[in-house]
Image (cartoon, helix red, strand yellow):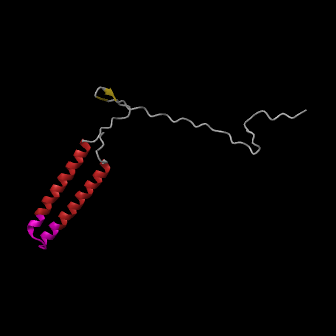
Amino acid sequence: MRIGVLDPRRIRLVVFGAIAASMFGAAGLCILSVWNYVARDVSWRAIATLVIVIATTVAFTLVNEFFGATIPPLGASTSFAGMSLATPPMPSPQPTPTVAPASASGRNPSRSNPPSQGT
């Protein structure tokens, strides 16, 4: 699995927004061209612009993910320049010690020996 130089999720969101905006813009200009509100060559320019925007954003996404770091699967080991880059295992959670609360008299209630009384 690869991650990008920039965050791939954000890049894909921006790419989706750019392509969607270009598609809606091109569709609007084509509709205006059909109804003769704009010249006929505007629709071809809009479609050509849409193709250029799509190609550019897709190429940027691919380059971003190609030059990003490769994430090895958990537990897999890889090597770089002869050094082993094994993924360290996840540490198991350690139980936290519990401390009995002190009583109002200041004694620890968990003690089994009551204080001795003088006889």
- Residue at image coords 28%, 51%: 11
Q: Position of residue 82 (x, y in %)?
A: 29, 26
The relative height of residue 56 versus residue 94 in the rendered view (above or below) is below
Q: Quadrant of residue 21?
A: bottom left
Q: Is residue 92 magenta?
A: no
For the C terminus, the image quarter is: top right
Front residue of this view, candidates 81 and 112: 81
The relative height of residue 5 versus residue 14 in the rendered view (above or below) is above
Front residue of this view, candidates 57 and 6: 6
Count how many numbered circles sit on residues in the image: 0
Q: Quadrant of residue 89?
A: top left
Front residue of this view, candidates 11 and 25: 11
Q: Position of residue 5 (x, y in %)?
A: 28, 45
Q: Position of residue 27 (x, y in %)?
A: 18, 64
- Residue at image coords 22%, 63%: 24
Residues drawn in magenta:
29-43
The outermost residue toward the right is 119
Q: Position of residue 51 (x, y in %)?
A: 15, 56
Determine the main secondary structure of the stretch shown in magenta. helix
Q: Is residue 36 magenta?
A: yes
The outermost residue toward the top is 82
- Residue at image coords 72%, 37%: 110
For the N terminus, the image quarter is: top left
The relative height of residue 5 versus residue 44 in the rendered view (above or below) is above
Is residue 12 shown left or right of residue 88? left
The relative height of residue 63 versus residue 112 in the rendered view (above or below) is below
